[in-house]
Image (cartoon, rainbow, N blue to C red):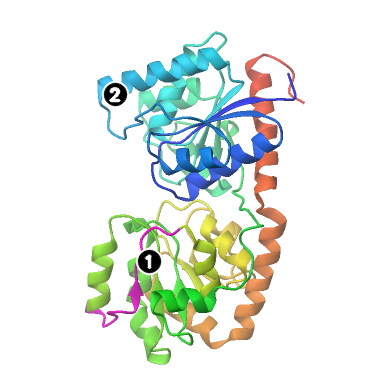
Amino acid sequence: MSDRLKVFNINVHKHWNGQVFRVFITSKLLAERGHEVVVGAPRGSMLAERARAAGLEVFDDLALSTKFIPHVWWRDYRALRALFRARAFDVVHTHGSEDTWLSCFAARACSPRIPVVRTRHNSYRIRSHALNRWLYRSLIDQTVVVAAEQAGRFVESGVLAADKLVAIHDGIDMSRFTPGPGREEVRAELGIPQDAPLILTVARLAPEKGHRFLLDAAPAIAEKFPETRYLFPGVGVTDAPLLEQAERLGLKGKVILPGHRDDVVRLLRAADLFALVPVDGETLGTSIIEALSVGLPVVATDVGGVRNVVRDGQTGLLLPAGDSAAIGQAVLRLLEDRDLARRLAEAGQRLVHTEFTCDHMVDQKEALYRQVIARARGAPVG
């Protein structure tokens, strides 16, 4: 096997999120290490745009529709098949349902067949039916989970065996997420008083992310810290319901939904506390890693693999999912005890700088690619 790998890394999402960032940074670092990397993305996607701007080769002659439309699917399949045959990639890495099915069929149409690695970025159970069993047992060579806690749901479904799963933790770009200036400017821009406690949640505006449970805790928090503000950057389907909830709770003007932001590190520097309180679907909580890297204290719920990062009483406060009373108590504890908040944040910062860097993540992916390629070629795996 050549030291230089040829990797096709594809993702279905059009908007920017943690999953898309991981595809982008993995591709970028692999290319910087001398590998031949092509990024697959939907036309007009933010991944395609940013990958090109970073000097990466992009293949975006794809619709990658999340709805099955036969003629659209067939066109995407033919485009991928032609690309795979022309470039003879060593490995294809997929990240979503639509791009996985397309890539698996296209890889299967090549001779020799190109091995496929699939990362599951959420902890939702895989539906156990014949097509999924065929996909995961026969078409996908290796399934990656972001946290070991995900594995149980997949094995219990009967779709995957434990030896077909490997955990690779996410990493972040430590050069970007560092303490620094910006607090005053961000607060002035968003109309947040400089001395108001600011709680930040960085997540899609989706029901499973649990923003509503944090807002339900707000009246109790307001009894001691009435000027507290809540900043929820992101896009999704719960923006209007959250604003309605805020008005019902007497929080009008104190819940800020600025939409998509490219300057998350500035928002983190402007905050006093980070809260991620999902009720389902979370894997590791990349935004928690970013918050800890900047030096923010963290409150989070015990969903998926979040406990790998938020170790209760050591690097943050870990709570039951959906428990607004517990969320409120934890927030108040950290706002009132700044020494505790500082100690937890410092310990969390040390943890992420040791275990959750992008380089560490890509080291593991590169090693996994070589193992998968060797197995596919019948070579010994060392």
Quarter holding the C terminus is: top right
Report helix, strand or loop for mark 1: loop
Check the image and name the residue furthest to the top: 111
In the rendered structure, are the residues bearing label 2 and label 1 in contact, judged by CB atoms less than 8 Å apart?
no
Above or below residue 347? Residue 113 is: above
User: Is 184 placed left or right of 315 in the picture?
Assistant: left
Q: Which residue is mark 1?
A: 322
Q: Amino acid at mark 2?
A: Val
Q: Quadrant of residue 180?
A: bottom right
Q: Is residue 366 above or below residue 174?
A: above
The label number, if any, that marks residue 349 in the structure image: none
Q: Position of residue 282 (x, y in %)?
A: 46, 53
Q: Which residues are magenta?
A: 248-261
Residue 303, percent from left and from top: 47, 57
Residue 72, label in figure: 2
Q: Amino acid at mark 1?
A: Gly
Residue 92 seen in the current view: yes
Dot in front, 2 or 1: 2
x then y, percent, for residue 95: 48, 36
* Residue 258 shown in magenta: yes
Q: Main SS of the magenta segment?
A: loop
Asked whether residue 318 appears in the rendered view, the answer is no
Indicate whether residue 348 is drawn in magenta: no
Q: Earlier in the sequence, mark 2 or mark 1?
A: 2
